Image (spheres, grey):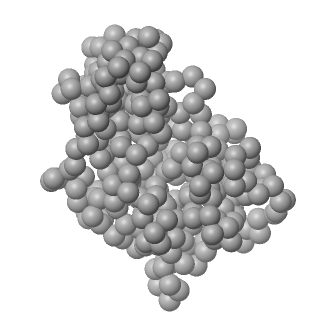
Amino acid sequence: MRLLLAALTLSAGLAATASAQTITVGAAGSGQPPLKCGVDGTFPPHAFSSLQGGLQGFQIDLFDAIGKKMGRPVEITGASFSGLIPAMNAGRYDFLCAPTTVTPERAANLLFTEGYLFTELQFGIKRGTPPIRSEEDLRGKAISVNKGTPYEAWVRNNAERLNLTLLAFDSQSDAAQAVIQGRAYANLGGNTVVKYSASRTPQYVADWVLPGTRFHWGTPFRQDSAAARNAVETVIECLKKDGTVAALSKKWFGAEPKEDDAERVVFPGFGVPGLPGHDATPHAAACG
């Protein structure tokens, strides 16, 4: 087995700027105290630097809409993804605006809203590389990932079996760049981000999707924040019903969500059905 962890940090450029920014969206002039959340600001098209200053992306627009619906400002701070959950648990954030994969392990330690998007694990490769058809095509290869994510966990969990080398970076942008530069054979990430990177970078190609890896992308809270989780989830349900989430998905990902996609489906109870932290109590969102 070869297991190599290369943790690299950004030192300059837009990605570093995005990681350090704090912006306020939502009902900024309401006079109410802000809800505080953290996001990976180097994760296009979900959250990344705007040339006009500040942050932009699907997450920014979504939590702007959530804040306006709740009548609360939302203070969004960019930080490295690997530090977001510890910072939230330490009380720095009320919740995370970052798209966070709801895994059984995370659901056992955090409270999540239902998913507002589905994510699948997908590989990105350098143009000209033979397409990946199965896990065997990865054997003995170096795989780049964003540090602290389920993508890193997948490589770690399969490193010995497939003789993989793990290259973990502080941003998805650096992980994708490692493929283009030839340091990694493939980059493993979420399908929305891999496809977006491919649409912007001719030398980077969205390739094989790992079978059976569809997860909810939800909003995490601390375990003592059930009331806050339920309040935000209710607003997310209203934004699904009025088409806001689907419209933002089309804007940022370039495709109309299907009727059975998470952007349109209101799931029963609070949280992700079938996972720890799910509250099956029926409720009806009062959407004004």
* Quadrant of the image containing the C terminus: bottom right
Q: How many numbered markers are drawn?
A: 0
Front one among 131 and 238: 131
Q: Residue at x 63, y 69 (%)?
A: 224
Q: Residue at x 52, y 59 (%)?
A: 62
User: Where residue 223 sits: x, y (%)?
Assistant: 62, 64
Residue 50 vs 255, above or below: the answer is: below
Q: Residue at x 38, y 51 (%)?
A: 82
User: Where residue 172 sits: x, y (%)?
Assistant: 33, 42
User: Where residue 86 sits: x, y (%)?
Assistant: 44, 60
User: Where residue 187 sits: x, y (%)?
Assistant: 35, 29
Residue 94 vs 178, above or below: the answer is: below
Q: Is residue 281 visible?
A: yes
**Left or right: residue 211 compared with residue 76:** right
* Quadrant of the image containing the N terminus: top left
Residue 221 vs 143, above or below: the answer is: below
Q: Residue at x 47, y 84 (%)?
A: 29
Front one among 140 and 11: 140
Q: Farthest left residue?
A: 12
**Left or right: residue 277 compared with residue 98:** right
Q: Farthest right residue?
A: 282
**Left or right: residue 78 compared with residue 10:** right
Q: Is residue 199 visible?
A: no
Residue 37 vs 155, above or below: the answer is: below
Q: Farthest bottom residue?
A: 31
